[in-house]
Amino acid sequence: MTCLFCNEPRTAGEVLFEDARVLVVLHEDWAVRGHAMVVWKGHVENVASLTIDDALHFAAVHHRAERALLAVTRADRAILLKLGIATPHLHLHIYPVSAALDRAAVMEIIEARVRDAMDERGRQAFVNELRERLT
Ligand SMILES: [Zn+2]
């Protein structure tokens, strides 16, 4: 059995931060600039399954990642989504969006029916800026 996040986390997107327990990965779909995931390294379904110490660590990494994403994208609002259907790893999606977007526009992003238009050079600079803020 192969698990993407256990074996090849870098194929899920750009890894922005990593420690012994958590990964922060920029999602490869670029549905919105800065779509990222905070990923628990173990196979855990829910935050409720973590010890309180681990849950606090997950929350602290989320806090740091969300601050960095909002600062670099200059977005107003972090949309958060936790599903767990595609992978056995607890992970939280962060979508930095404009507060001007309505519910339908946000759902287009969550369903990945749209894609950010930044070119490859711009993306690399964006990734580097996020990495600097998260390390
Ligand atoms: Zn795994």
Image: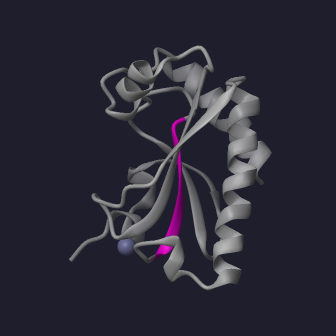
Residue 3, percent from left and from top: 31, 69
**Furthest residue in direction bottom, as rendered:** 51
Q: Quadrant of the C terminus?
A: bottom right
Choose top left, top right, bottom left or bottom right for residue 131: top right
- By secondary structure, the bulk of the magenta-drawn segment is best described as strand
Residue 123, percent from left and from top: 56, 26
**Furthest residue in direction front, as rendered:** 103
- Residue 39 lies within the magenta run: yes
Q: Is residue 119 above or below residue 68?
A: above
Q: In this view, does 114 lie above or below 44?
A: above
Q: Is residue 27 above or below residue 103?
A: below
**Furthest residue in direction left, as rendered:** 1
Q: How is the image coloured?
A: one colour
- Residue drawn at x 45%, y 67% is 90
Residue 80, percent from left and from top: 53, 45
Q: Is 125 left or right of 84, judged from the image as shown?
A: right
Which quarter of the rendered image does ligand 1 occupy?
bottom left
Q: Is 24 left or right of 107, judged from the image as shown?
A: right
Q: Is 35 left or right of 135, judged from the image as shown?
A: left
- Residue drawn at x 70%, y 82% is 53
- Residue drawn at x 35%, y 24% is 108
Choose top left, top right, bottom left or bottom right for residue 69: top right
Residue 20, percent from left and from top: 63, 76
Q: Quadrant of the N terminus?
A: bottom left
> Closer to the camera, 125 or 115?
115
Q: Is residue 81 above or below residue 21?
A: above
> Closer to the camera, 90 or 6?
90
Which residues fall within the magenta stretch? 35-42
- Residue drawn at x 69%, y 25% is 76
- Residue 81 lies within the magenta run: no
